[in-house]
Image (cartoon, grey):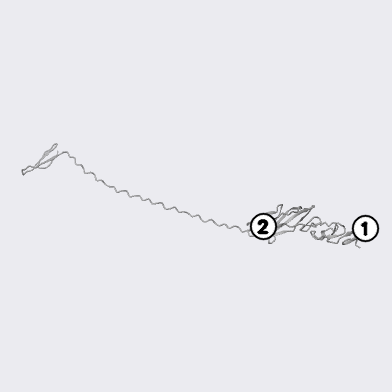
Amino acid sequence: MNGRCDHICSNIPGGYRCQCRQGFVLMADAHGCGVCGRCQGGDVNCDPMSGVCSAGCQDGWKTQLCDKAVDPPMDLAVTDITEEGFKVTWSPSPDLDLEGYRVVVSKLDMTTVVNKTSDEASFPVVGLSPETDYIIKVTALFSSGGWRSQSEEAVIAAATGATPTTTPAPASTTTMPAPAATTTTPAPAATTTTPAPAATTKQTSRMTTLLTTKPSTSTVREAVGDEGSFDDGRFSCV
């Protein structure tokens, strides 16, 4: 008889005591044995009597006994992608023991470039290299009865964008000024030389010539002047 113990029954003064094999923990009824295989580091860190995992729980479990499962972040997505980063979003966890989230971003060679925590269900990742592939891992962090644990990782891949190519502005077109209109200066009008009035011969004598024709064969000329005389058929002025 094993005293109704699932695994091991040990006699003690006045009675007996049930015990469990490695990797199992005594249940609350003090007779049954439950699996104690969710401790961090394996069942060697599980107290077979109390079931407490001294090294904490494996990812995805919480409490001292590591007997309650927790879900990883759901609906993981990457938005707002640029050449230097992106924004990671997910659905918030409804677990009351939630403390926050951890975001880890690595290159394909597993070089970690970001390892941060966030209280929000999103995280902006900046300072990355253009046109580079990355792996994003997000875990939910919990604290239950003073014992810390975390969910399994939610994983998504993303790549940064290309560096925008700057197109040089077209060279400014120099507008040549239109040639100045040529003003044709009219040639100076030909100067019409008005001939000087003929010199007025100052007549020192005013003469009235009277021509009298007489029936005789000789012509008589009489000259009347201010002063002077008729002589030899010519005028002579003094």
Question: In the current view of this chain or complex, which residue is farthest to the bottom?
Answer: 1
- Quadrant of the rendered image containing residue 168: bottom right
Residue 202 left/right relative to 5: left
> Tag on residue 49?
none
Identify which residue, 99 or 75, lies in the foreground.
75
Identify which residue, 51 or 4, lies in the foreground.
4
Residue 36 left/right relative to 164: right
Q: Are marks 1 and 2 in contact (CB under 8 Å)?
A: no
Residue 161 at x, y = what percent?
A: 63, 58
- Quadrant of the rendered image containing residue 115: bottom right
| Quarter in which the C terminus is drawn | top left
Question: In the current view of this chain or complex, which residue is farthest to the left?
Answer: 216
Disc 1 target residue: 15
* Precedes in sequence: disc 1 or disc 2: 1
Disc 2: CA contacts within 10 A as few (<14), some (14-19) or many (>=20)? some
| Quarter in which the N terminus is drawn | bottom right
Disc 2 target residue: 78
Say what amino acid the circle numbered 1 marks: Gly
